[in-house]
Image (cartoon, grey):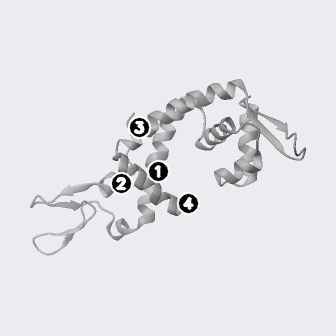
Amino acid sequence: MACAAVDGAEAIAQEGIDEAGEPGLTNEAEPDHAGAVEDKGGVGAIGDILGFHIRLAHGAVYRHFMETFAHLDLTQKQVSVMWLVDEHPGIAQTDLARRLQMDRATVMAIVNRLQARDFLERGRSQSDRRRQTLSLRPAGKDALADARQAIQAHEAWLKARFSEREVKQLIGLLERIHH
């Protein structure tokens, strides 16, 4: 599945070859023969801002995810909730919120939508009657199985851009930001 262009950002992140055959970033402005700077469609100094590239990468990955998942009518957050509930039957909503680094109100809204589709059911904890537990219903298990297949396709698309070592390195670097 091809991913849509990243608002012209592909040229920003790709390396090009200059006239001398040397690699160079395409977002560089180069002087012409008269000494004037010619903009080759790049973004200039913003190309040196890490957050800019993280935003572009997030956008590309999110768009591909949405293309891959369009037929499932599920969001990333909904799939994440179902995945964790499947791995931890009886998990409490508060534990889900903590593990997914989401506020409790957001998790409650996601759970409500999934419950309305008969994907999840709420229950009461046997050890603490104040806690609501969650478990997947059969329709939720089926939807999650389909989602896992879509995730495999999405991950293959993403990981094809990196070596195995680079994938591990990238995960480690990104964990520094979100942990």
User: Which numbered disc, 2 or 4, marks the residue closer to the eye?
Assistant: 4
Q: Earlier in the sequence, mark 3 or mark 2?
A: 2
Q: Distance between the residues labelled 4 and 1?
A: 17 Å
| Up/down of 106 relative to 151, above or below | below
Q: Contact, CB < 8 Å: mark 4 with mark 3? A: no
- The residue that appears at 43% across and 48% down in the rendered structure is 60
- Amino acid type at mark 4: His
- The residue that appears at 41% across and 55% down in the rendered structure is 169
The residue sitting at the bottom extreme is 35
- Disc 1 crowd rating (10 Å Cα; few below 14, some 14-19, many 20+) is some
Q: Is residue 4 visible?
A: no
- The residue that appears at 50% across and 36% down in the rendered structure is 151
Q: Which of marks 2 and 1 is nearer the N terminus?
A: 2
Q: How far apart are marks 2 and 1 (CA)?
A: 10 Å
Q: How far apart are marks 4 and 3 (CA)?
A: 23 Å
- Disc 3 crowd rating (10 Å Cα; few below 14, some 14-19, many 20+) is few
- Where residue 64 sits in the image (x, y, percent)? 45, 41
Q: Provide the secondary structure element on which disc 2 rests.
A: loop
- Amino acid type at mark 1: Gly
Q: Provide the secondary structure element on which disc 4 rests.
A: helix
Residue underneath mark 2 = 9
**On residue 59, which mark appears?**
1
Residue underneath mark 3 = 156
Q: Provide the secondary structure element on which disc 1 rests.
A: helix
- The residue that appears at 65% across and 55% down in the rendered structure is 101
